[in-house]
Image (cartoon, helix red, strand yellow):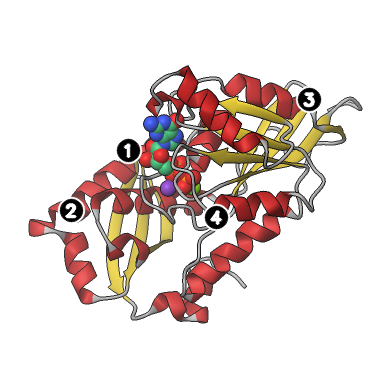
Amino acid sequence: MNNNTKSGFVAIVGRPNVGKSTLLNTLLKEKIAITSPKPQTTRHRISGILTKDNYQIVFVDTPGMHKGKDLLNKRIDKVAVSTLKDVDSIIFVVDRKKGLAEEHVINYFKGLNIPVYLVINKIDLMKNKSEIDEFIISYLGSYEFAGVYPISAANDENIEFLLNDVVKSLSDGPFYYPVEMKTDQTNEKIMSEFIREKILYYTEEEVPHATAVVIESMDYNEEYKTVDVRALIIVERTSQKIILIGKNGEKIKQIGTEARLDINKKFGFKAHLELWIKVKKDWRNRPNELLRYGFDN
Ligand code: GDP
Ligand code: K
Ligand code: MG
C-alpha cells in the first residue's frame, strides 16, 4: 500500500427487486449476495469489497426499503436508512417498473450532499433505445444525478462506465480492509444465505419470509476429506416444515443439493451438507430469536 491509494463507501439503494444484489455480484465478479425474484431476499446490510490497482471501494448492499409490520421488517428498514448516512456516494438503482416509493427516496437524497449515480437496470428487458431514453428523461427533473447509467446487471452490460465514474469520485485515503477481503460476511453467514436462496426459489408465498437459516457447526472430515456443514432451518409453523420437506423429502433434498454446489464453488472445498428443520412459533416478532439469527438491535 502506498500514499496514493483511494477509497470510499458506496451504498446501493432502490426498491426491492430492481437488481441491487445482482449488481453487487457483477461489480465484484463473485457471488457474495443472494438474489431472487422475490422481495425481501436481502435481509442484512452486506459489504462487497472491490480492491484493484490503487483503489478500494466498499459497496454496501442494502435490504430494500419496505413497509412491513413485523419486528423483522422494522429492523430491515432501519438498516437501509442508517446506511445512507455513512457513505461517500450512492448508486440508486431503478428498473422500468417505477414505484411511488422512489420519490420519497429521491427527496431523501437532497439532504445528503453526496454524488448519486442513477442506474437504469434490466435494459435487456426494454424494447429499444427510445424506451430507455424516455425512461431516463422521466427521472431527470427530480434530482441532479452525478451520472446516468443504463445497464444490465444480470448480463454484465455497461457496468464499466458506472465503475469508472465511481472510482473517479473516490477520495485519497488508506484502504479500509485487507486487499484479499471480498465481503464483511462470515463464511457461515454466506453458507446460510446460499441455503436461504434455494428456499426462496423452491417455495412460495409465506414460506420464504417465515424462514431463517443458521449454520450450527462446520467440521473438517479427515476420512472423507469433506467439510461437514450442519445447518438449521427455522420456520414458524409445522405446515411450513411439511412444505419444505416436500413429497418423499424431495424438496429439501433439491435445496440441499443446489446449496452445496454453490458452497463448493465459492469456497473451493467439498461440502457435506446436513439440513435440519425446526419450528419456532412467531420468531419474527421475538427479539431473542431475532438476535440468534443475526438481526441485532
Ligand atoms: P434486489 O432485491 O434489488 O437485490 O434484486 P435482486 O438482485 O435480488 O434481483 C431481483 C430479480 O431481478 C432477480 O430475479 C434477478 O435475477 C433479476 N435481475 C437483476 N438484474 C437483472 C437484469 O439486468 N436483467 C434481468 N432481466 N433481470 C435482472
Ligand atoms: K430480490
Ligand atoms: Mg437484494
Residue 294 sits above or below residue 165 on the image:
below
Q: Secondary structure at mark 2?
A: helix
Question: Is mark 2 in CB contact (under 8 Å) with mark 1?
Answer: no
CA gap between label 3 and label 1 equals 37 Å
Q: Which mark is residue 101?
A: 4
**Is ligand 1 closer than 8 angstroms to the Cβ of mark 2?**
no
Mark 3 crowd level (few <14, some 14–19, many ≥20, 10 Å Cα)? few
Q: Which residue is mark 1?
A: 261
Q: Residues within 10 Å of mark 4 (few under 14, many from 20)?
A: few
Mark 1: is the Cβ under 8 angstroms from ligand 1? Answer: no
Q: Circle 2 sits on which residue?
A: 251
Question: Any atom of ligand 1 within 8 Å of the CB at mark 3?
Answer: no
Q: Is label 2 or label 1 in front?
A: 2
**Amino acid on which the number 4 mark rests in the picture:** Ala
Q: Which residue is mark 3?
A: 168
The foreground one among 220 and 74 is: 74
Binning the other alpha carbons within 10 Å of mark 2 as few (below 14), some (14 to 19) or many (20 upward) gives: some
Residue 32 visible, this angle: no
